[in-house]
Amino acid sequence: MVNEQPVPEQEKVAPASADVPVDAAVEEDGKYVYCVIKSVDERDFGPIGIGEGGNRVYTVHHRNLAAVVSDTPIRIYDPTRENVLAHELVNETVMREHTVIPMSFGTIFRTRDDIVELLKSTYQAFDDVLEKMRDKIEFGLKVLWDRDKVVAQLEEGDEDIGRLKGEITGNAQSSTYFARMQLGRLIESALERAANTYVMDIHESLKPVAVASRSNKPIGDRMIMNAAYLVDRDREGEFDEAVKALSRKYEEVLSFKYTGPWPPYNFVNIKLRLERAE
Amino acid sequence: MGILKHLLFWPVTGPEFLTKFAMGRVHDVVRDNLTDDSPIKEELLELQLKLEAYEIDDEEYMRREAELMERLREVRRWREEFGMGVSGGPVRVAAEPDEPPAAEREPEPPQRGGPASPSGAEIELNWDE
């Protein structure tokens, strides 16, 4: 499966969205860190780094840990689609061969030594987490519904709603104001129940084939579910099948946006102690 | 001011106290509004969803993304102004000489992005089950 993300035409970037160098006059060189992996061998992942010019992506080592980095001016990278896709592309490339602990978008270190120092001081934690995440991948599942269709189903299936609806249509002018109000309220609460039922059913079907899950806030008014699942690599096929079965089951009213495999963005949180400004 | 003094001199101190209290609240609300980037990030996600659903074209996406980036930078500037942690950029707040020692300051939100110091990291696993 591939990530369903068409790459926008980069040449259309408006000048206003250009990244902001910290100091436009003196751009120091730093290292953008994408993720941490286990590897003793030095690796070169090619010229796929973030920023203009496609910098080489390579590894910085401490014992059997390695940070995957590319050189960059020290700057703030705006989370534009272009930049976020560049960050994700590197992680996707690396995770084909390694278990990765992804860094947050935009993380930049000043020097190679700083990175080695981080790996050294957090060695045990990285090592443990890499072990826990070994051969586990993340999938994203966003579920959107067709509200009108669900409402139509409710009007057919729900006795109270059907009756009120009938009253209102049979009574075109008078006395319908309160009936309409009541109908609206009934529909709203029936919709909420319906959404919960869908989400529960989907979640219960996927839980047995996943290691863990996270539910994020739905985006926009059509989304009823925005979740991430952590899945064992060797159960990827099963998970895939489960999602497909659900999407067939609900194809009338729900659409599934299924993405991945991702590195475990939603399941590992690295809190860096960043430098206070000078 | 102690509660007893407040009661004794309320006719004198009350109005000033209330004004200060109200202004403080207004200040907090304004500050929260200026420094919260989560609504902007939500809009960004929504915009990306629209692009993926072909509801908007690349051109419109780029235009609106640029606006959102400008708003994110604005929030970043305010966060720096208020000495708060910023995400996605180096921290540039000058350490004020009269700044209270770190222990007395409110804990800062985790900072992300920008040049990172080697003083280490915490790694958390977020598992629901």
Image (spheres, coloured by chain):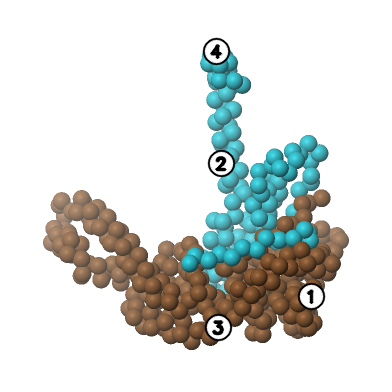
Tell me the CA gap for discs 1 and 4: 70 Å
Q: Which amino acid does label 2 sit on?
A: Val
- Residue at 61% x, 78% y is A134
| Badge 4 vs badge 2, beta-carbon distance below 8 Å | no
- Residue at 56% x, 13% y is B9
Which structural element holds mark 1? loop
Reading the image, the residue beneath label 2 is B29
- Residue at 79% x, 75% y is A63
Q: Mark 2 lies on which chain?
A: B
Tell me the CA gap for discs 4 and 2: 31 Å
Residue furthest top in the image: B8
Give how far across and how far down residue A211 sits, in percent: 50, 74
Which structural element holds mark 4? helix
Can residue B56 be seen by looking at this rendering? Answer: no
| Badge 1 vs badge 2, beta-carbon distance below 8 Å | no
Q: Which chain carries label 1?
A: A
Reading the image, the residue beneath label 4 is B8
Give how far across and how far down residue B39 sits, in percent: 54, 56
Please state if B94 lies on the left or on the right of B16 as rendered: right
Numbered tag placed on residue A63 in the rendering: 1
Chain B pictured colour: cyan
Numbered tag placed on residue A233 in the rendering: 3
Give how far across and how far down residue A261 sits, in percent: 56, 80
Nearer-the-camera pick, B104 or B49: B104
| Quarter assignment of residue A14 | bottom right
- Residue at 68% x, 66% y is A125
Nearer-the-camera pick, B18 or A9: B18
Tell me the CA gap for discs 4 and 3: 72 Å
Give how far across and how far down residue A135 sits, in percent: 59, 81
- Other-residue count near label 2 (Cα within 10 Å), few / some / many at <14 / 14–19 / ≥20: few
Q: What residue type is labelled 4?
A: Leu
